[in-house]
Amino acid sequence: MSPEKVVTAANGGHYPVQLASHEDVVKDRTLFINTLRSFHFSLGTKFQIPVIGGKELNLHVLYVEVTKRGGYDKVVGEKKWREISSVFDFSPTTTSASYALRKHYFTLLYRYELVYFFRLQGSMLNQTGTRPPPSFQAVGTIDGKFDCGYLVSVKLGNETLNGVLYHPGYPGSSASAHPMCTAIIPYTPQLHQAGRRARRRRAGDPGRPKPNRSGYNFFFAEKHSSLKSLYPNREREFTKMIGESWNNLSPEEREVYQSYGLKDKERYQKEMKEYKERLKMGQRC
């Protein structure tokens, strides 16, 4: 089953502005990481470097290897994930490396690839550029409804895909406040797991606390604002400039922003505790 097709077809919002060329991010790992971090920050999606076999995955190498073979869809179509996994020095005990690389690439790099490699701009629903949007015929049914979307089953060729379809425009919400309400999130229904399904449904709750930001996120927002007023015509260079500024901070200066991140983490943990207590009280009532 290939749930990636469903997510690609249902992406909402707009692509972030490309801040550097594909050629530059391929050559410069620091620039790549900074633009990727900024990309996820702009989308409101979580960015965290995954670990495979006890080591952090080199996302830069992964991006370079996939794009030099024509991009994600071509690698999937030509079944080259095993070839790509051989580039990495994974432990012999690491199993399903090809599957893990494909999963992490789709989650962290696929939309980045669309912007930086294929240079797509504008609405994610109205894709324009050199790369044609994916097209297919599908027949679906609505299996259930909840606060901001539906439980659906979609017939795609010989496959049946089950998922959650979130609507970004439900009353009292916004796409920026609820990043999970911008795509179909695939899931596999299983018996005796009602609690897990309930947690998934609560992900669209408007009362859920806003995720915490890291110290770098605070530094990036502050620096970006000042650079925009100083250099309004050089926005494409901001991410690289900010990354260099961050790397040049003294330990004392960096600690200031890290403390902001720690305080925001404490805020998030406190709000989540209160949020869970409210949910428990609501269930008792």
Image (cartoon, rainbow, N blue to C red):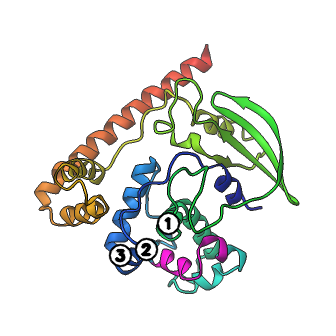
Q: Secondary structure at mark 1?
A: loop
User: Could you tell me if the residues under marks 1 and 2 are in contact, i.e. CB atoms within 8 Å?
Assistant: yes
What segment is highlighted magenta in the picture? 61-74
Dot 2, how many residues are within 10 Å of its Cα: few (below 14), some (14-19), or many (20+)? some
Q: Which residue is mark 3?
A: 29
Per the rendering, the mark at residue 22 is 2
Q: Say which of marks 2 and 3 sits in front.
A: 2
Question: 141 above or below 233?
Answer: above
Amino acid found under the numbered disc labelled 1:
Arg
Q: Quadrant of the C terminus?
A: top right
Q: Amino acid at mark 3?
A: Arg
Which comes sooner in the sequence, label 2 or label 3? 2
Residue labelled with disc 1: 119
Residue at image position (30%, 40%) is: 264
Q: Is residue 142 magenta?
A: no
C-alpha span from label 2 to label 3: 12 Å
Foreground tag (3 vs 1) = 1
Work out whether mark 3 precedes mark 1 in sequence or the reverse, and give the earlier one: 3
